[in-house]
Each structure stands twice: as C-alpha cells, then as structure tokens.
Image (tube, coloured by chain):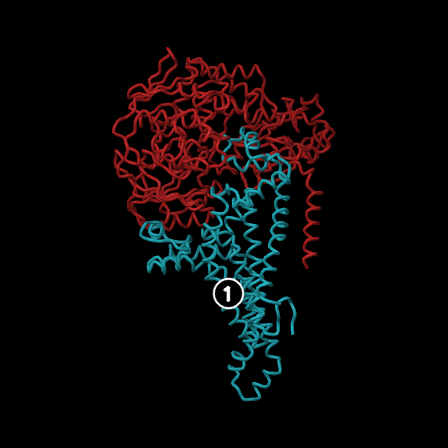
Amino acid sequence: MTKKLIVTIVALIGIIAMVLPGCDGGEPLPSIYIGSGALDGNGVPVDFFSDVHVRKAFCYAFDYDTYIAEALSGQGVQRGSPVVEGLYGYDSDAPMYEYDLDEAVAEMKLAWDGDAWDKGFKFTLLYNAGNLPRKTACEMVSEKWAYIGATDPDILDGEHFQVSVQALAWPTILGKIFGARDMPMFQIGWMPDYPHADNFIVPFMHSAGTFSYFQGYGDSALDAQIAAAFQDTNPTTQLVKYAALQQRYYDDAPGIVLAQPLVRRYFTQHVTGFYYNPCESSYPGDIFYLTKADNGDDIPYKNAGSLIELTIGDAESLDPAWQYDNASLEQSRHIYETLIYYSGNSTDTFDPILATNTGEFSATNNTLRFTIREGVTFHSGNNMTPEDVEYSFERAMCQDRPGGPIWMFYQALIGEDVWSYDDTTYAAIDASVEVDGQDVVFTLSGAYWELPFKQVLCGGWASIVEKQWCIDKDDWDGTEVGIADVLHPLLPGDTALFDECNGTGPWKLSLWESGVQIVKVKYDGYRAPVPFDNVVYKIVEEWSSRKLSLLAGDADIVYVPGTNFDEMDTEEGLNIFKNLPSLSIDAFFFNMIIGGPAE
Amino acid sequence: MELRSYIIRRLLLLIPVLFGVTVFIFGITMLFSPIERASLYIRSARQMGDIPAIIATYGLDQPFWVQYGTWISQVFHGNLGWSSVVNMPVWDAIWNFLPATLELAIFATPLIILMGVFLGTRAAAHKDRPLDHVTRVGAIAGWSLPTFWLGLMLLMVFYGLFRGLLPPDRLSFPMNLLVNSADFVRYTRINTIDAILNLNGPVLLDALRHLILPVITLSVVNVAFIMRLMRSSMLESLGKGYILTARAKGLSERVVVNKHARRNALIPVITVSGYVFAAMANGVVITETIFTFKGIGWWAALAATRLDIAGVLGFALFNAVLFVLVNLVVDILYTRVDPRVRLGGVMQ
C-alpha cells in the first residue's frame, strides 16, 4: 500500500508539472475575446477601439436611464466624465452622451472607413461574477447592438454586431486588466482618496494613470494639461482648466461613464441624527452625532447605549499608516482623530479638530501651519503634543507599506517625483514636517497643494498617534537608523499598531476578533460627551441574517446591497436615507490595444 | 500486529499524504497569474496601481518550486503563513475558528447519531409497514433539503417571524461582552463548555439558545445517512440465527431488538459516526455562514474564494491530519467493537 501511495503521489506531481504552463508563474496570453482578431464580421482587430468613432458609437448606444433604473434601482445619476458632483473641479455643464441609437449608427458608419458597419463585429465582454450591475451593463451593450443589427433595414441580422457576455472571478478580471490586457472593454469603479478632480482625472486620463495606462489612453500633451490644471493656484482659472479636461474626456470618449451612484443608509427608528458627507468612509457616517432612544414599537428597542452595525468586510489593519480600505478607515474615525475634518457635508471646507485652526498658508515657503489644541489626551492618559503630530506623519512616511496611502504625503510634501520612501531621503521627510512651539508646520511641494493636502489631512491615514507610546511598542524610534526596522512592512501584522490602538478619539479599542467583530468602548477622558458606551462593528456576510437582525432590533444599522433596496422600502420601523451622492464612479473602459502594445 | 507499531506506521503515512495534498493545491493555485494572486492584497480600486510592487514584494512571479520551497521551509519553522482574509497567522486562524465548528459538531453529531439509530431501529423493526415508510421518506426528504434553504427558512421563522426568538450568531450582544471581559475565562473558546467551567448559567443558556437552529439544520439534513445505515444493519442482524434463538427462548420482541439485534447492528454505525464527526469538525460552510457561526468551514471557504493561498494550504493540512487521525481512531475502534477484526486488516 505504501508503494502504491508513493507511485500515486509521483504521478500527481508529474501531471501538475505537465499542466502548469512552464511552472514559471505564467506569461500573458493572446486575447481569446476578439474572435477572429480581424474586422471580418467574426471578430475585431486588437486596435478596434482606437477609432474614436467606434468609441462614440458605443457611448451613444448605451441606455443610461435604463441602466440606472434597473442595475442601480434608480439610485444613480449619469455623468459625462469621471469628475463627479461633489469633487472640487466638477463642472455641472460638462457634456454627456445621451442614449441615441441614430447617432450610434451614424458614428459606427464612420468607423474604420465604414468597414465596422459593413462587416460587423464580434467580441466578448467580461464582468466580475456576482456583480449584478456590471452584468446588467454588459448585457445592455450586447442587446443594443443585436437590436441595431436586427432592425437596420440594410442588415436585418441580429448577429451582425455580436457581443457575448461572460463572467469571471474578480481576481481574474483584475489580472486581465493589469496584466494580460486582453479584454476588449473592462468595467471598474473608482472612489476618491481626496475629493479633488485631479484624484479622478489622473487615473482615467493620464498616460500613466491607474486605468488609462492599461487601456492605452493618454499622451504627454494631455499629461501637461492635467498637471497645469492641478498646479493652477487661481481657483477661477483652475476650474476653467478642469472644465476643459471634462470636455476632453467627452470628445475622446475613452470610456462609457455609467453613473455616479446614489447610496442609501438604513437605520432603525431608534437612531437619529444622521447627516451625510460624501467623503465619509464610515458606513454609518459620523456616529458622534447620532442618538439612540426608544422611538417606537415597530422594531424592538435593544442594547441601549450601544450602536451595532452589521456589514461585510473586516478591517485589514488598525494602523492608521496602513489603512487604505473603508473598513479599516471606519475604525480610525472612531478611535483616532485628525487635525481637521470636513465641515458638515462639505468636501472643501473644514472644521478644526485636533488643531485650533484649519491651516494657515504662507506663500513665502508654501507652508501650512496648524496650531495644536491643548488639553487633549490619548487613551493612554498622556497629553497630546505637537511632537506627537510631527511623529505621526514622519512615522507614516518612514513605514511606507507597499500599496498603502502614504504616497499622498510624499506627493504633497516632498515632490511630484516622489511616490515612496525609496524616492527620497529621511532628511527631506524630516524637513517636511516641523514643530514650532505649539504649531506644526507642513512644507508643501507646491502652493497648489493647499486644498488637496487639507483634504488628505481628513483621511484616517493622517490620524494622530502618541509618539512615546509607539516607541514603547517597538514602532519607529524617531531616528534615521531606526527606519530600517519598520520600512516596507509586508504583512498587516508586521506593524506595531496592527491591532493595538491609542488615539484621542471618543472610543477606544476593546476587542478585535478578526473576521467576526470589532468592539470599541467609550473613552471616559474624551473632551466632549460621548453618545454610546459601545460601538460594535460586526461582519455578517449573509444578507438575510443582516436584514432579520435589523428588524429584530439586534442591529441599529446594516449594510444593504443595492439589489435589496426595494425589499427594505416596505419594512416598518426604519429610518431610511436615500439619494445620497457617493463620490464614486463606475465606467466601461475601451482597450485601445487589446493584448497590450508590442514590446 | 502490535497496536503501537500500527499507530506509528499509520502516522508516518501522514507525511506523503500532506506532501501530496499541498503540492496538488499549490500547483492548482499557480494556474492563476501573479497579478490575479496580487489582487488578493487589493482592498479598493485606489490600490490597483500598486500591483507590480505587490508582486515583487511577495515574490508572486517566482517559479513554482521557489514559491513552494519557501512555503515548505516556513512550515518547518512552524510558520504556516498569513491568512489575509482574516488578518492573522494561519495557525492562529485554525485555533480561533475551530472551537465554533467543534461546538456545532459536539452538539449535532450525537443528535444525528441518536436520531439515526432510533429511527433506523424503528424502521427495521417495522419493515415494510407504515412506520418504516414514513421514517424513510422523512429522512430522505431531510437529506434532500438544501442546507442553505432550510437554514434560511428556520431563521426567517424563528428569528424573523417570532422576532428574535432563536437568533443567529454564537451569543447575544450582552453575553458577547461578558465572555470577552475580565470576568470570564475562555478556556476552550467553546462557549457552552466555557460557560460550564465558569459556572455561568446565563452564558450557557444563551449559547444553547443560539445553537438550536444550526444544530437542527445540520441534524435534519444528515440524519438520513445514519438512519439508512442503521436500518440496513438492523435488517441483517435481525436475520441472523441467534435472533431466531432468542425469539425461540421466549424473549420479548423489545429485548430481542434492543439488546440482541441492535448491539451487533451498531458496529458499522459506530465506525461511520467517526466520519460524521470528522466531517462536522471539517467545517460546515453553509450553516456557519447563514447563522453567523463562524467556524473553520467559513474561514476555509472564504480563503478559497479569495485566493488566500496560505489559508487554503493551512486548511488542507489541517484537513489531512484530521482525516488520517479519524481513520486511525475508527480502525482501532472497530477492532475493539468487533473482536473478529484485527489490526492490519486481518479478520478471523
């Protein structure tokens, strides 16, 4: 039996060795989604979408209103470019494509000298499995072009323009977008790091943008136009430049901008005080202003003094310098504080939090000066000092975890060529944040960073930590020599503040059961009354369980997917907030060179 | 064969089994490109531009043997890797989530076995009569029910319709705070056992209340397996000569069935029960997900769907060890229960 077992294992290894493609990690493969690969009616060439008339035809052929009504349950607004309403630089007069099949036909007849219309085309659209809005969008594209072919009197063939639809796992989709680049079109969404037009225009339009680079769109002239807009310190002319860029996106049609989603929030009747800021990464919003009281009998009133949220997705880390996902950033909003934060529902005006002002800018040296509030204590009981503020930012820049958010600090404080610690020096980092008495002074890499950097300061990554406490936890010791011990951590658990917190916020960490829940308890030393004794964040993947828990009063707010909006509207005892504009966008991207440019 | 050498020999088989399992799974995951595996570390669209850096950092573009060799060397140092889906070392993930699954297994397995034995005995004793038909149809109907459907139905009725009567999760919010406080010691992380060890009645009752629905779901679906086996075994046993002798001696039918027939019929059921427990301890994904009873099955499914390779490999190792040990226990148990069977597979 032992011999048979050994032979079986050896055979298995042999099979795997033969099956694996060279056992070397894999090479990009040619696209299997473009049919024949030629404009012969059975496929499309790899540069099919490099013709602007093709792109415009697809933009005109998309039924935006139906998409919003069906895929987003009506919770969306069409936009003409990636710059959505709420972002600084948004142009309400920016043009957008309307659903017009006649225009779509006219544009397609111009494409490829008429060959695209005469010969027809065939390719495959892909979406990430389980994402119903993206599936709907793909099916709409497919159905519209089949309809055009079937109803045109010169064609009368529903398969003349053939777009197949296929689902793939999300990691596979990402692999194709950023690796193989073999999808003719891809769908993906974007949400802001900071609510500024530049944060959306660069990934969508810059030649090195997160998406535009991989779709083969953009050039040096457009890059210069984007930089000129960002670096314009005159708000009036800057807005004109951003309007021009939004016009340019319409003219070039590098993608189909689907919609700016409108989101909803569902509380029980017992929770009031909700206000919405589109930058708020926290699902319940700013819970500091919420109130929970027995407001009726439709839903049982339970767990007085506690706010319980059921959602999907666990935090990745509680280290502010690591956090780049919404679940983690939500925890920072409760445990830590920043120097300033957005005022009310604004995205470009601020209230002082740990600072006593919202930043005094000096054009002499491009400095931004904050006076640090006195009398603030950390959860450890120690007083917050300007040195803690300085340390918080320098610490983040000396940690610089791969794929993290700290590139924003480098860009704003060091220079536009600096994206990581590897691109700069400790001396430059040290000089970018200085203490001056009770003030902390940031030296910006350009005057144009004043507004965007203030927006960056509102993010959880800009939370203030206690220097000595961190050092005692074997975090960065504040010296250049000590950087080597903390630089570029590979795993979330490699940082000292992964699961330990010491902030100045209204709540402090009590328990983190990974994958299960995060419990925070009231910090008695907070400088204002704290509304809840306990704030609980529970991960419940099953929608029915979340819904039933909300209706049973065991949860105060739950995450509701868009596909379940309608069923919640009929329930009694809920406070529902609709039509909340999110600062995100979902779009189709046309791949200008399917399979990527030749090496 | 001597028991000790038999056990050692069986345990040594773990090595090729674990090697084969891990090579196979590692090989399968290598079919995904480095970018696909790097996307695991992406939590939002904003991070997508960092995929090349992530690939370089984690060596995702290294050849198969390099990546596997790195992993194996870490395993020998006691490091099973980091489970990114739950943000903790794989070893910690196993120990963190196993208690919830064990708690379900501890309560569901006896119920499944007892119900299965009882129903199987009754069915066999009343063969081809209405009770037999009803019992078999009922058990098969339960077996045929999709677990997710039954679980959701029970939840909607007993938690939704009866507004919170039998809730999901492992504990209610106040009890959850209590067991995580300094006033409660979590010896095993199995809430019912810990409640007993802490002499805390309210926690015990709350934990039992939260166990009712998931245990019922598991039992209804799985009892048919034991019931059918017991029925077959009983029918075979009832046909033996010593049963005829017992009846001829004038023993009551109840004594004949329960004392003489059932004892011998239990032999295969006992050994299969070991596998039932192992299957439960392996994790019951759907039940754990629907009732928010997060155990090792929930974690393994999450790791698989999100390409948490370290998690998948760690679970595979745990699984392999579990089944090898259960097989060993069952084989030894069989020799104890049936003296005709000897270790090494020889039957006298």
Place of residue A410 in the rendered image (x, y in percent of width and height, measured from the top left): 45, 22
- In terms of depth relative to the viewer, which is nearer, B128 or B106? B106
Place of residue A215 in the rendered image (x, y in percent of width and height, measured from the top left): 60, 26
Assign the C terminus of chain A to one quadrant of the image: top right
Instruction: Identify residue for label 1.
Output: B112
Left or right: where A79 falls relative to A273? right
Q: How many marks?
A: 1
Chain at tag 1 = B
- What kind of residue is marked 1? Ile
Left or right: where A177 falls relative to A317? right
Residue A18 seen in the figure: yes
State the cyan chain. B
Left or right: where B210 falls relative to A250? left
Left or right: where A20 falls relative to A476? right
Q: Secondary structure at mark 1?
A: helix
**Which residue does the image show at 69% across and 22% down from the upper left?**
A112
Q: Give the vertical position of A359 relative to B134 (above or below).
A: above
State the red chain. A
Q: Residue furthest top?
A: A364
**Which residue does the image show at 39% across and 29% down from the upper left?**
A477
Q: Give the vertical position of A2 relative to B68 (above or below).
A: below
- In terms of depth relative to the viewer, which is nearer, B167 or B340? B340
**Which residue does the image show at 52% across and 15% down from the upper left?**
A225
Residue A91 seen in the figure: no
Assign the N terminus of chain A to one quadrant of the image: bottom right
- In terms of depth relative to the viewer, which is nearer, A124 or A77? A124
Q: Quadrant of residue A578?
A: top left
Place of residue A95 in the rendered image (x, y in percent of width and height, measured from the top left): 51, 21
Place of residue B324 in the rendered image (x, y in percent of width and height, measured from the top left): 58, 58
